[in-house]
Amino acid sequence: MSFRSRYTGLIDRYRDRLPIRDDDRVISLGEGNTPLIRLQNVPRAIGKDVDIYVKYEGLNPTGSFKDRGMTMAVTQAVNAGSKAIICASTGNTSAAAAAYAARAGITAFVVIPEGKIAQGKLAQAMMHGSVVIQIQGNFDDGMRLVKEVAESAPVTIVNSVNPYRLQGQKTAAFEIIEELGRAPDYHSLPVGNAGNITAHWIGYCEYTSGSGDHVTEACAFCQGHCKFAGGAVTGNRPVMVGYQAAGSAPFMRGEMVDQPETVATAIRIGHPQSWVHAWKVKEESGGWFDECSDEAILAAQKLLAEKEGVFCEPASATSLAGVLQDLESGRIAEGSSIVCTLTGHGLKDPDTAIAQSSRAPIVVKAERGAVEQAILANL
Ligand SMILES: *Cc1c(COP(=O)(O)O)cnc(C)c1O
């Protein structure tokens, strides 16, 4: 029996397109290679003839796309001799940083907003043995503090301001093109710091222009780390659309938001770190930003769970909520192919899920008749 085709993570799979040296020690948990699921019941339910795929990033090792970036960032940190990493987080970055640090045998410091991260994410950060620092402030405060502290403390920042993060995350675009045989017409993502929408655009540009020597002028995003050859683009690239929660939508306001608020805690960010990049992605791809109400976000989360069997966290459902709005208004035409990134798993945030689920559990006596009655009443 041969194990040669065993999947060993995205660095091994896309080694020739990533900033990695042959003798680097790779810190991986088998991230990437996530399912691209074609929705069957949602298009029927909304009466539209469209091809909607969801890229189920919740099936990464720690339950979010952050693992794609973290395998690269921690690999780079370890090979550069770093003994500790630090991040500010709305939850998923801390979960990923904690897990990859554990794997690497280094220390992770995670700075999170007190009381504003989902239970599953806090459990992960604690269980993987990271040092959890809860601040009486929001993500934006945490990000500012992390940058200040890292000026003097011997720690490597693994937020998406670390260019290796975006390098890892760009591989999701590679997987989509390889699976569909081309890029979709539209790619929709929830936007917080806007690192992921930027990473996807790097991936689409790089893949469709072929690998080659890096041309700094051609790629404004990667600080010299990608393999974008520049020049001729031979394949199609998607229109990139980014959706934000209405209470936390600096890209819609056109300026930073100081008190962001939304049920979608993963995108409760008012001062996006990739602000300039994201505007460029919008411009280059011919895309747009829009906002969704918390109600629309939760409705989309429920629709996916109840109609397709796909459970994502609230922030992730923003990608579908926005697409549903734009299909309704006609901004996205019928007949289009669309990929929505489902950034994180629904189990991350059980409290929000239980609070809004349609069916409360039925409590009955532990007797055959009572169970039968419950079944008959609900058939
Ligand atoms: C981090 C995160 C986002 C936002 O990604 P950005 O790169 O910050 O725009 C969206 N959804 C989930 C679940 C996340 O963890």
Image (cartoon, helix red, strand yellow):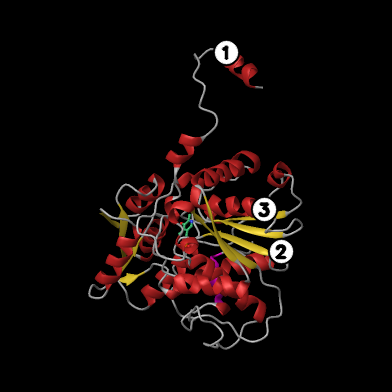
Point 44% across, 68% down: residue = 27
Point 40% across, 72% down: residue = 161
Q: What amino acid is found at the position of numbered circle 1 in the picture?
A: Arg
Point 73% across, 59% down: residue = 336
Q: Separation of disc 3 and disc 1 at Cα?
A: 51 Å
Ranked by sequence position, the earlier of labels 1 and 2 is 2
- On the image, numbered disc 2 is attached to which residue? 180
Q: Quadrant of residue 272?
A: bottom left
Point 55% across, 50% down: residue = 317
Which is more foreground, mark 2 or mark 3? 3
Mark 3 secondary-structure assignment: helix
Which is more foreground, mark 1 or mark 2? 2
Q: Quadrant of the C terminus?
A: top right
Residue 72, image x and y in percent?
Answer: 46, 71
Residue 311, image x and y in percent?
Answer: 56, 45
Q: Are marks 2 and 3 in contact (CB under 8 Å)?
A: no
- On the image, numbered disc 1 is attached to which residue? 368
What is the chief secondary structure element of the magenta stretch? helix
Which label is found at residue 329? Answer: 3
Please report the bounds of the magenta region as a residue range: 8-15
Q: Residues within 10 Å of mark 3 (few under 14, many from 20)?
A: few
Q: What amino acid is found at the position of numbered circle 2 in the picture?
A: Leu
